[in-house]
Image: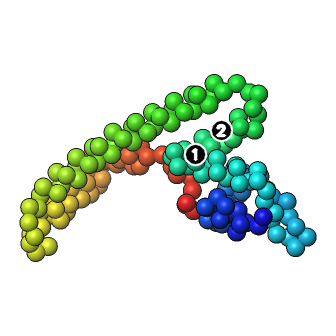
Amino acid sequence: MKIGELALAAQTQVETIRYYEREGLLPLAPRSEGNYRIYGPEHVERLAFVRHCRSLDMTLDEIRVLLRFKDEPQAECGEVNALLDEHIGHVATRIRELRQLEKQLKALRQQCAGVRDAEHCGILNKLVQASSATSIRSASPHVSGAHGNRGRRANNSTTE
């Protein structure tokens, strides 16, 4: 099957398939005489595996490790267990961060009980105050106000 057929079979965009090939998650497909990639059932299976791991918010590096073990079925899976335990920890951290974010957003929402002009909107005014305070802290060499990525793990992919 050609890449478009693989994309349909796996419900994945062609660009994502090419990205996974470049990243080494999918083996390079042999080419036809017309220089088209020809994919087989093993590509569909591997792509489905990768997509399922991505749906579990696993990074490409984590998926590489899992694929290595999948490709070596006789290897012991202790590292797989450790990888999943670590991933569960990342998810738990993210859940805590999201709960905190929800609290902050609810508190912000309480700043404006009704509809009024934007100049007197409690939410907008609170956002302006908070951003001004952040700018002042960031400009001060004595106060650390940088939160960076707030613990978010890199997605490693911009095509999904």
Query: Looking at the image, do the residues carrying marks 2 and 1 touch, with CB atoms under 8 Å apart?
Result: yes
Quarter location, residue 99: top left
> How would you rate the neighbour count of disc 2 (Cα within 10 Å): few for under 14, some for 14-19, many for 20 or more?
many
The answer to which image quadrant residue 74 occupies is top right
Query: Residue at the spot x=50%, y=36% of the render?
Result: 87
Depth check: give the residue in front, 32 or 103. 32
**Residue 75, placed above or below residue 68:** above
**Foreground: 149 or 31?**
31
Residue at x-position 58% and y-position 48%: 52
| Residue at the image position 64 percent from the left and 51 percent from the top | 48
For label 2, the SS is: helix
Q: How many marks?
A: 2
Q: Residue 125 at x, y = what percent?
A: 14, 64
Residue on which the image places disc 2: 66
Would residue 76 be visible to someone looking at this image? yes
- Residue corresponding to mark 1: 53
- In percent of width and height, residue 30 lies at 85, 60
Q: Amino acid at mark 1?
A: Cys
- For the C terminus, the quadrant is bottom right
Residue 40 or 34: which is nearer the viewer?
40
